[in-house]
Amino acid sequence: MRGIKTGGRVAGTPNKITNELREVLKEVAMNELDNIPALLKEVTPECRLQVLVKILYLIVPKVNDDTQAYFDLKQITGMNIM
Protein backbone atom coordinates (compact mmCIF):
# COMPACT_ATOMS: atom_id res chain seq x y z
CA MET A 1 0.00 0.00 0.00
CA ARG A 2 2.71 2.40 -0.88
CA GLY A 3 1.71 6.02 -1.48
CA ILE A 4 -1.61 5.76 0.33
CA LYS A 5 -1.81 7.54 3.67
CA THR A 6 -3.49 5.32 6.25
CA GLY A 7 -2.82 7.19 9.49
CA GLY A 8 -0.63 9.59 11.39
CA ARG A 9 -0.65 13.36 11.12
CA VAL A 10 -2.58 15.11 8.39
CA ALA A 11 -0.28 16.60 5.76
CA GLY A 12 0.83 20.09 6.80
CA THR A 13 0.29 19.55 10.52
CA PRO A 14 3.34 20.83 12.44
CA ASN A 15 5.38 18.31 14.39
CA LYS A 16 4.83 19.15 18.08
CA ILE A 17 8.15 17.68 19.28
CA THR A 18 10.13 19.59 16.65
CA ASN A 19 8.47 22.88 17.59
CA GLU A 20 9.08 22.29 21.31
CA LEU A 21 12.73 21.42 20.66
CA ARG A 22 13.21 24.55 18.56
CA GLU A 23 11.77 26.70 21.34
CA VAL A 24 14.09 25.14 23.94
CA LEU A 25 17.15 25.57 21.69
CA LYS A 26 16.14 29.15 20.91
CA GLU A 27 15.90 29.93 24.63
CA VAL A 28 19.32 28.37 25.32
CA ALA A 29 20.88 30.34 22.46
CA MET A 30 19.28 33.61 23.56
CA ASN A 31 20.57 33.11 27.12
CA GLU A 32 24.12 32.59 25.80
CA LEU A 33 24.22 35.72 23.62
CA ASP A 34 25.32 37.90 26.52
CA ASN A 35 28.26 35.55 27.22
CA ILE A 36 29.72 35.58 23.70
CA PRO A 37 31.88 38.74 23.99
CA ALA A 38 33.51 37.51 27.22
CA LEU A 39 34.09 34.05 25.78
CA LEU A 40 35.67 35.46 22.63
CA LYS A 41 38.10 37.50 24.72
CA GLU A 42 39.33 34.31 26.41
CA VAL A 43 40.19 32.33 23.25
CA THR A 44 43.16 32.58 20.92
CA PRO A 45 43.04 35.02 18.01
CA GLU A 46 42.90 32.05 15.62
CA CYS A 47 39.85 30.61 17.38
CA ARG A 48 38.18 34.03 17.53
CA LEU A 49 38.68 34.45 13.78
CA GLN A 50 37.29 30.97 13.12
CA VAL A 51 34.15 31.79 15.10
CA LEU A 52 33.70 35.12 13.35
CA VAL A 53 34.13 33.55 9.91
CA LYS A 54 31.57 30.87 10.78
CA ILE A 55 28.92 33.36 11.96
CA LEU A 56 29.61 36.06 9.39
CA TYR A 57 26.89 34.70 7.09
CA LEU A 58 24.33 35.57 9.79
CA ILE A 59 25.30 39.24 9.56
CA VAL A 60 26.29 39.82 5.94
CA PRO A 61 24.23 38.32 3.11
CA LYS A 62 26.00 35.95 0.74
CA VAL A 63 26.95 37.48 -2.59
CA ASN A 64 25.58 35.50 -5.53
CA ASP A 65 27.64 37.19 -8.19
CA ASP A 66 30.15 35.55 -10.53
CA THR A 67 32.46 38.55 -10.16
CA GLN A 68 32.70 38.38 -6.36
CA ALA A 69 36.17 38.68 -4.92
CA TYR A 70 37.77 35.56 -3.51
CA PHE A 71 40.53 35.70 -0.94
CA ASP A 72 42.53 33.26 1.10
CA LEU A 73 42.33 33.97 4.84
CA LYS A 74 45.44 31.87 5.47
CA GLN A 75 47.40 33.99 3.02
CA ILE A 76 46.11 37.25 4.55
CA THR A 77 46.43 36.30 8.22
CA GLY A 78 49.10 33.62 8.18
CA MET A 79 46.70 31.43 10.21
CA ASN A 80 45.27 28.05 9.29
CA ILE A 81 41.52 28.75 9.27
CA MET A 82 39.00 25.89 9.33
Image (cartoon, grey):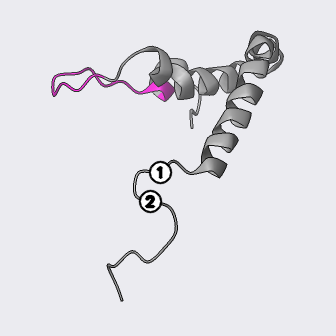
Q: Quadrant of residue 3?
A: bottom left
Q: Quadrant of residue 29?
A: top right
The three-letter code of the residue at mark 2 reads Val
Local secondary structure at mark 1: loop
Name the residue: 67% across, 24% down: 46
The three-letter code of the residue at mark 1 reads Thr
Mark 1 and 2 residues: CB-CB less than 8 Å, in contact?
yes
Compared across the picture, whether 30 is left or right of 12 comes to right
Name the residue: 50% across, 61% down: 9
In magenta segment, residue 70? yes
Residue where numbered disc 2 is placed: 10
Name the residue: 67% across, 29% down: 26
Q: Between 60 and 2, which is closer to the camera in this rendering?
A: 2
The x, y position of residue 42, in whole percent, is 83, 17
Range covered by the magenta-colored residues? 63-74
Name the residue: 40% across, 58% down: 11
Rendered view: 57 above or below 19: above
User: What's the magenta bit mostly, secondary-structure-wise?
Assistant: loop
Compared across the picture, whether 68 is left or right of 30 comes to left
The x, y position of residue 22, in whole percent, is 64, 38
Q: Between 38 and 78, which is closer to the camera in this rendering?
A: 38
Q: Between 61 and 17, which is closer to the camera in this rendering?
A: 17
Q: Quadrant of residue 65?
A: top left
Residue where numbered disc 1 is placed: 13
